[in-house]
Amino acid sequence: MKTSLMVIAAAAAVVFAGGANAAVDAAKAKALAQSKNCLACHATDKKLVGPSYMEIAKKYKGNKDAAAMLNKKVINGGGGVWGTIPMPPNPVKEDEAKLLVDWILSL
């Protein structure tokens, strides 16, 4: 019985620690999106010049290749998927693009 309780407690600690870490990552990602001017064209919940982050998350949900593809698009720019206005290349490092994309896909 003690072993079961210890396993449950350890699992709960991992879950709650992951949740706290995810909140920190979301805050970092939002701040990064603001600092890199992403929010001039994107919003979390509504279309601006580009699609909302929630629309992006919905479109690529379950696509195992989405993160890698979107990381490249954030860095290099892209177009044709969401309409005629292309997204220009962005001045972000690979780790910054990954943070942004992971946050977007988590929505």
Image (cartoon, grey):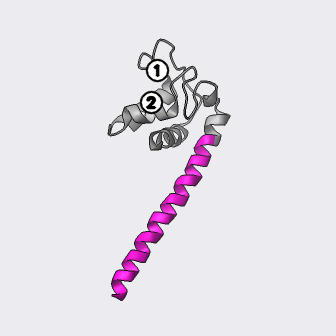
Name of the residue lying farthest toward the top: 84
Query: What secondary structure is marked by label 1?
Result: loop
Name of the residue lying farthest toward the bottom: 2
Examine the structure image and report whether residue 9 is included in the region drawn in magenta.
Answer: yes
Q: Nearer the viewer, residue 87 or 44?
A: 44
Q: Amino acid at mark 2?
A: Lys
Quadrant of the rendered image containing residue 68: top left
Tell me residue 67's x, y (percent). 40, 37
Between discs 2 and 1, the one toward the N terminus: 2
Q: Which residues are magenta?
A: 1-30
Tell me residue 2's x, y (percent). 37, 88
79 lies above or below 66: above
Q: Nearer the viewer, residue 19 or 32?
A: 19
> What residue is disc 1 on?
78
Q: Nearer the viewer, residue 8 or 94?
A: 8
Q: Residues within 10 Å of mark 1 (few under 14, many from 20)?
A: some
Q: Residue at x 46, y 20 (%)?
A: 78
- The answer to whether residue 33 of the structure is visible from this angle is yes
Pick the quarter of the image with the N terminus. Answer: bottom left
Q: Residue at x 32, y 37 (%)?
A: 63
Tell me residue 7's x, y (percent). 37, 77
Which is the main secondary structure of the residues drawn in magenta? helix
Give me the disc on residue 72.
Answer: 2
